[in-house]
Amino acid sequence: MRNNLLQLTVVFTFLLQYSWGQVTYNGLWKGAVFSAKIDDSTEQVVFVSMSKYKSNLEAFIRIEKKGTVSFYTFKTQGDFLDSILTFNKSQLDKKSKDQISAEPWGMRLKYIDSTGYMEGELFSANKTISSKRIVLFKSTGKIDALDKKETSHAWFYLFQKEYKLGLVAPDLRDEVRKNFQFQSVYFDPAQDILKEEFQTYLKKVIQVVNGHTDLRLKVIGHTDWDGSDSYNEKLSLKRAETIIHFLETNGLSRDRIEYEFQGEKKPVESNETSEGKKRNRRVDFQFI
């Protein structure tokens, strides 16, 4: 890489739509730069320390080659207008300890309100390299500009796993858990077959549990009052087992699931009506 100053054009584009509260841009963001997908072949990780005051923006960026001491840094300034953050005055740091081939480049990113990640494209300003994808998440700490020691990238593998599982960004997970609304999964009379309409909901449950290492899930099977007590206990167990099988098949470890089967003992509505029976043929959930 040339040691002289290079002019970089870095464009950050954010769509400001919020589901979990207003995003705070100030502070550290980190993530990865990759060609097709985030996997073990991903070579570069990126740290962006950003500050915003009214419409004025500044950022310090460090790019590292994963698993090595190679890195380079640069500073950039820009402005905030119409919900767009644009950085277009950038210079490489003359003291960068770079062993990575680099050239002028830019970024276009969008804040994904439903996940808390910023995602977009990293591209060559000179069009001499293929564009790459970039994903960032909000973090803590500071960027070390000139540290020659090998930087640990152990966090990358957890980030890679969680992103591929579809989990929301780490800083949103407590809020998602706090606001998560359980719903019952319902079954047809005398049946333990999972209906397709509930699969999307169950996958959301999996994402919430997988996003917290200290969280487990209780699955509780129920029936209406048709049939004997013994029959209904067995049927409620089968319904719980059906749900557990789906959860396991779709990525939730069995050791994070507990279950109960209540038979007809805990109706939520009267069994005197067909609608009441329908609501009693269910599986409920609890975080534990």
Image (spheres, rainbow, N blue to C red):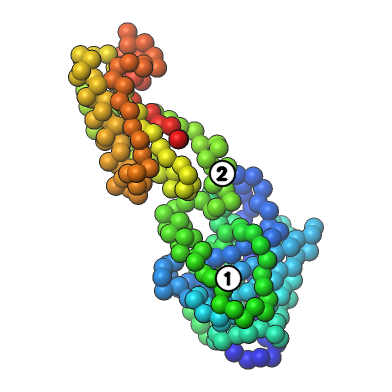
First along the sequence among labels 1 and 2: 1
In the picture, measured across the screen, residue 256 lies left or right of residue 123, that is left
Residue 78 image offset from top left, x and y in percent: 74, 69
Quadrant assignment, res 276: top left
SS class, disc 1:
strand
Residue 200 in sight? no
Q: In the rendered view, would you say 146 is above or below 28?
A: below
* Residue 39 visible in the current orientation: yes
Quarter occupied by the N terminus: bottom right
Q: Residue at x 51, y 82 (%)?
A: 129
In what quadrant of the picture does the C terminus appear? Answer: top left
How many numbered badges does the structure rendering display?
Answer: 2
* Dot 2 alpha-carbon crowd within 10 angstroms: few under 14, some 14 to 19, many 20 or more: few
| Residue 103 placement (x, y as % from top left) | 59, 85
x, y percent for residue 213: 47, 48
| Residue 52 against residue 73 in the figure, above or below | above
| Tag of residue 174 | 2
Image height of 277 relative to 157, above or below = above
Residue furthest to the top in view is 272
Residue drawn at point x = 62 percent, y = 47 percent: 18
* Residue 105: image location, x then y, percent: 60, 78
Q: Amino acid at mark 1?
A: Val
Q: Residue at x 20, y 18 (%)?
A: 230
> Which tag is nearer the camera, tag 1 or tag 2?
2
Q: Looking at the image, which residue is at 52% across and 69% down?
A: 153
Q: Is residue 185 left or right of residue 73?
A: left
What label does residue 46 carry, if any?
Answer: 1
| Residue 96 occupies quadrant | bottom right
Say which of 95 and 8 sits in front.
95
Could you tell me which secondary element the residue under label 2 belongs to? helix
